[in-house]
Image: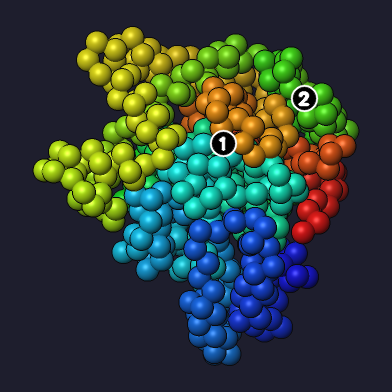
Amino acid sequence: MELLEKSLKELHTLIKKKELKPSELVQANIERIEQTEEKLNAYITVCAQEALEKAKVADEELLRLSEDEIPELFGIPIAIKDNINVEGIRMTCASRMLESFISPYDATVTKKLRERGAIFIGKNNLDEFAMGSSTETSYFGPTKNPWDFSRVPGGSSGGSAAAVAARSALASLGSDTGGSIRQPAAFCGVVGLKPTYGRVSRYGLTAFASSLDQIGPITKNVEDAAYLLNIISGLDSKDATSAKLPVPNFLEALNGEVKGLKVGLPKEYFVEGIEPEVKALVEEAARKLEKLGAELVEVSLPTTKYSVETYYIIAPAEASSNLGRFDGVRYTYRAKNYKGLVDMYCKTRAEGFGDEVKRRIMIGTYTLSAGYYDAYYLKAQKVRTLIYNDFQKAFESVDVLLTPVTPEVAFKIGEKTDDPIKMYLSDVFTIAVNLAGLPALSLPCGLTAQNLPVGVQLIGKAFDEETILKVAHALEAELNLSLKPAL
């Protein structure tokens, strides 16, 4: 357990000095999964045997390598959200539709991790096809919050966040379409980073809403997030939307210096409806930054109030198109009893998809249909531009924005499953960031009286992950929290 508390950098140093064998680390990780998994259900697939075999090969290789030849993640187990492809490992997207699909290739991010020596320990649970805010829509059952098993871990990267919080994963990769890294990170008391759209390749991520999806790290601390972002960032010829920009060394940004930085507090994010304890802890975090020398500035993002409606037109529209490929012909699930091709399509999709996925496909198909495209989809894209312009205007006067991640703490399992609108509002403070394509980070800022974590969100300018990591690292040190669920 002590090993699993260490940062990625500390583990790398121990392995480089040959004071730690990869097999010892992998074995410790497997034992922790065995201790916690029955309570959490944070993994869909655990690769215990394969990981141990790779670790033993790494043990032998380690004897031959000099310190300089050992890559950053050599022998370190990493978990991956189960909508990202890892060659030779099952990739289900938490759906019956892909229940037995084995990925024939690596996503670009997993290829990069593999090249740096990472060992894949397993695939984390999620909402089906990443559609949800609670990890309750998984075909493989809900994940539980490690702080309170009667509550959700958030979603859709709930399995990744719960595993990192419970130390059954040293770190994980998640995906964020409307807050799916940051919201579960806040609910579970860990760090979640959504990079700028285009900073990290999406090749090998199962597409949900292609203009919004982004892969990012979920980690125990800010340093680990920067460590992984260094590895997974960069231009990729297989993803036409990846940016042709140099990748800075994000670890060098963690110098603790925030004096003189202007931190914007958007007044629309501190309104009625936020739980008082959440608001108080986030405001306290802002005052900590002020104490460190940052200047707090009130700003306005007036179109934020339209972000949920805009998102729930654009995202389902893209999902209805992207999920058209799951038809019973090309992938694993096919209905057993049907009459003819069209009947096979209909029955396969009716049986293979869950209710939330079907709901979004129907909404998306409707908003893209003849006669409604201009009224809904086109208008939503225009509002999206206004939301982006609001952020641009705010960043003329501040360096970074600070907001709550969520208006409340983790809610009870089943509390919102019968009310989709209530569930969609869980992401009210994160969605606008995806619509604008900006980077944002969720950092734990305290516990409520019920012993539940609260997160603070830092939003940066496009491709300025350095500033949000710098501010988050300084704030993390000042808060000096030691958040670990009793599990």
Check the image and tell me how it is coloured. Answer: rainbow
Crowdedness of circle 2 by 10 Å Cα count: few (<14), some, many (20+)? few
Disc 2 target residue = 275
**Residue on which disc 1 sits:** 133
List x then y, in percent, for residue 479.
85, 43
Q: Is residue 7 above or below residue 208?
A: below
- Give the number of the disc on residue 73: none
- Name the residue at 59% across, 24% down: 422
In the displayed structure, does residue 187 sit left or right of residue 141? right
Residue at position x 83%, y 52% in the image: 482
Vertical order, 71 against 225 (above or below): below
Please state, as top left, top right, bottom left or bottom right, where the N terminus lies in the image: bottom right
Classify residue 302 as left or right of residue 344: right
Q: Secondary structure at mark 1?
A: loop
Is 366 on the left-hand or right-hand side of 18? left
User: Residue 487, located in which quarter of the rendered image?
Assistant: bottom right
Q: From the viewer's side, name the closer residue of 169 and 469.
A: 169
Nearer to us in this view, 203 or 150 = 150
Residue 407 can be seen in this image: yes
Quick one: label 2 or label 1, which is nearer the N terminus?
A: 1
Q: Residue at x 87, y 37 (%)?
A: 449
Q: Amino acid at mark 2?
A: Glu
Amino acid type, mark 1: Ser
Task: Characterize the local packing of mark 1: few (<14), some (14-19) or many (20 or more) Cα atoms within 10 angstroms.
Answer: many
* Residue 374 in the image, given as x and y percentages of width and height: 30, 11
